[in-house]
Amino acid sequence: MEIVIVEKKTFEALLSGVETLTGKVGALCRRCNDKQMQKWLDGQEVCRLLRISPRTLQSLRDNRTIGCTQINRKFYYKPEEIERLMPIAGQFRDGFG
């Protein structure tokens, strides 16, 4: 085991930096915890809600009509995006045109 000797002033500066970092991390954690975690919908749920086929959903993604996030090979959608498309979902069922 290696022993490292540092001056008291240097050690106190290091401790001060660690305390500052701890405070900032704590503030970030509190800010993130204050935000409500929203539920993301997968493709199957979106198809069921909009009454569209998986291929139509893919077309909506390709045309950037609907926003999504991809994790590994699965796509997830914000509920707000689905609510935004609800009034015009019939157009997608009838085909793009």
Image: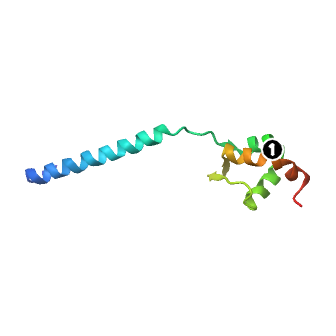
Residue at 54%, 37% in the rendered image:
36
- Residue 89, percent across and down? 83, 48
86 w.r.t. 59: above or below = above
Q: Quadrant of the C terminus?
A: bottom right
**Quick check: 19 left or right of 49?**
left
**Quick check: 30 left or right of 21?**
right
Residue closer to the observer: 95 or 27 = 27
Residue at 64%, 53% in the rendered image:
70
Counting the numbered discs, the total is: 1
**Is residue 5 visible to the viewer in this orientation of the structure?**
no
Looking at this rendering, what residue extends furthest in the right direction?
94
Mark 1, residue position: 50
**Is residue 48 visible to the viewer in this orientation of the structure?**
yes
Q: Which image quadrant for residue 10?
A: bottom left
- Residue 87, percent across and down? 81, 46
Q: Give the colour scheme of this rendering.
A: rainbow
Crowd around label 1: few <14 · some 14–19 · many ≥20 (10 Å): some
Residue at 73%, 44% in the rendered image:
83
Residue closer to the observer: 62 or 32 = 32
- Residue 49, percent across and down? 78, 40
**Quick check: 91 left or right of 79?**
right
**Quick check: 51 left or right of 75?**
right
**Which amino acid type is marked by label 1?**
Leu
- Element marked by disc 1: helix
- Residue 9, percent across and down? 10, 52
Residue closer to the observer: 62 or 35 = 35
Residue at 37%, 43% in the rendered image:
27
